[in-house]
Image: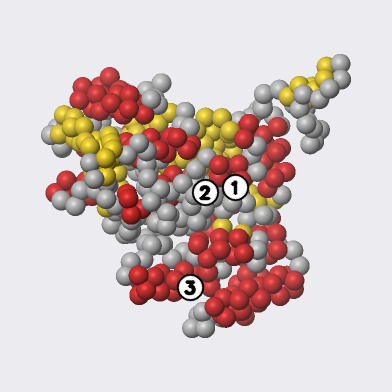
């Protein structure tokens, strides 16, 4: 009698009188995900958890993401590298769900200490973003602007076209680049011609990019590994602390986000499994990162947006500019309907609430707690963006604390009104808040439990 199906021999499968019993996974991954539209401060949470991690992984997205970490008053910006690279003892891993622009990857390396290079591993199954993907991204955005009068607000980093190549099954992967370059060159020329046929005005220097790629292949080869086998060994081998850093956020997920104003990958918890080759049973704690208010870059519905003095204050105090594009972020009140929806999809173990200090000067703070359309309450977060643009938001108004929280280092020292704000969020979501951020540095993250 078989209690579980055996796909491989593992030390975790024990035999008792011809009965096989699957024991608990030895090493489960801890996941950090954005719970809004991105820019929540995930990098800071990852950096905090990565200090004692053995392996820090990036599972999806590309260099359209941007994470900022401040350590010892030095600010680090990351786009492709996991934020955990700052831990000199941890190995960083870029999984097969990531699309990699090689010039961007190596440029980012130059900004970091060179001795970190040997601690990076890259999945051989990861797809590559080429220069013509980025050019096409810009052309498509221009076309959308002309045809519909409103673009998607893409970062023009080539992420969408690269994932399109992946889905069309004519994309090229890292394993292709580091194998026989003659075969790779042939495939590359076919792919480039494909885009030239679709976009005759596309400016592509095929020979020059091939020369660059040949050089990158030599630099990349020592870093490339069989990603599935690499993760399997990490999960089933000796005890390890494994951290997964999600890029973008739940409401930008290609399937669950505010489509079409989304990214091109799965930035919810399912992307951890598909982007790294991690079985679902190996997913442990899932932490959702929530900004104490709401921001959004680019266009798209934003129910709690404050296009007024409040929004201007949040934008100014929060220094709300995109790390990747330097675009000004739109700002508004915390939307708990949106965060609750993100929790439905991800099943957060706990919340990291960031940038609470930005609310320090407000005498009262509003929180979105319900949606309605034409005076009819909506039971859930709507899929249709035409509906979302029409919703009216019901707010709960809470008292502000009108004093600085930047030097506070424990929950009990926070003003009573700030404590109440945090407890209100917990009660609404039915998820505990584990950390509260009151500044940019590592030390400004207050741990509640």
Percent of width and height locating residue 71 = 40, 41
CB-based contact (under 8 Å), mark 1 and mark 2:
yes
Total numbered labels: 3
CB-based contact (under 8 Å), mark 3 and mark 1:
no
**Quadrant occupied by the C terminus:** top left
The residue lying at 52 percent from left, 30 percent from top is 285
Q: CA distance from mark 3 to mark 2?
A: 23 Å
Q: Residue 1 occupies which quadrant of the picture?
A: top right
Mark 2 — residue? Answer: 266
Q: How many neighbours does mark 2 have within 10 angstroms: few (below 14), some (14-19), or many (20 or more)?
A: many
Q: Looking at the picture, tell me which residue is in the foreground, 12 or 266.
A: 266
Task: Work out whether residue 83 can be spotted.
Answer: yes
Q: In the figure, 212 relative to 116: above or below?
A: below
Q: In the figure, 245 relative to 300: above or below?
A: above
**SS under mark 1:** helix
Q: CA distance from mark 3 to mark 1?
A: 25 Å
Mark 3 — residue? Answer: 135
């Amino acid at each position: 009698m078989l209690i579980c199906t055996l796909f491989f021999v593992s030390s975790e499968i024990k035999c008792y009188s011809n009965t096989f019993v699957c024991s608990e996974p030895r090493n489960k991954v801890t996941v950090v995900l954005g719970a809004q539209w991105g820019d929540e401060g995930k990098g800071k949470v990852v950096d905090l958890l990565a200090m004692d991690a053995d392996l820090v992984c990036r599972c999806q997205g590309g260099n359209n993401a941007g994470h900022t970490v401040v350590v010892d008053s030095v600010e680090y910006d990351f786009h492709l590298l996991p934020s955990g690279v700052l831990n000199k003892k941890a190995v960083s891993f870029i999984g097969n769900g990531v699309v990699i622009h090689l010039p961007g990857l190596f440029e980012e390396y130059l900004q970091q200490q060179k001795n970190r290079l040997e601690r990076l591993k890259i999945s051989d199954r990861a797809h590559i973003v080429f220069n013509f993907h980025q050019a096409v991204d810009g052309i498509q955005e221009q076309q959308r602007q002309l045809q519909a009068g409103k673009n998607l607000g893409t970062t023009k980093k080539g992420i969408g076209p690269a994932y399109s190549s992946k889905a069309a099954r004519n994309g090229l992967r890292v394993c292709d680049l580091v194998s026989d370059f003659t075969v790779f060159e042939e495939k590359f020329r076919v792919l480039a011609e494909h885009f030239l046929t679709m976009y005759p005005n596309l400016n592509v220097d095929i020979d020059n990019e091939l020369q660059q790629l040949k050089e990158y292949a030599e630099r990349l080869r020592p870093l490339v590994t069989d990603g599935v086998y690499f993760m399997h060994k990490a999960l089933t081998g000796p005890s390890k602390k494994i951290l997964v850093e999600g890029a973008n956020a739940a409401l930008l997920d290609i399937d669950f986000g505010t489509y079409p104003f989304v990214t091109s990958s799965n930035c919810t918890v399912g992307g951890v499994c598909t982007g790294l080759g991690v079985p679902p049973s190996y997913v442990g704690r899932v932490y959702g990162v929530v900004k104490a208010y709401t921001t959004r870059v680019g266009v798209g519905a934003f129910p709690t947006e404050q296009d007024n003095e409040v929004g201007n204050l949040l934008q100014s105090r929060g220094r709300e500019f995109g790390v990747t594009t330097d675009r000004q972020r739109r700002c508004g009140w915390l939307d708990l309907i949106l965060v609750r929806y993100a929790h439905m999809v991800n099943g957060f173990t706990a919340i990291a609430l960031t940038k609470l200090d930005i609310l320090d000067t407000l005498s009262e703070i509003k929180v979105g707690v319900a949606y309605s359309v034409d005076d009819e309450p909506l039971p859930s977060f709507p899929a249709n963006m035409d509906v979302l643009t029409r919703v009216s938001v019901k707010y709960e108004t809470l008292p502000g604390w009108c004093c600085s929280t930047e030097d506070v280092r424990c929950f009990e020292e926070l003003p009573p009104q700030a404590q109440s704000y945090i407890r209100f969020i917990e009660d609404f979501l039915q998820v505990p808040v584990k950390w509260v951020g009151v500044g940019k540095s590592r030390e400004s993250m207050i741990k509640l439990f």
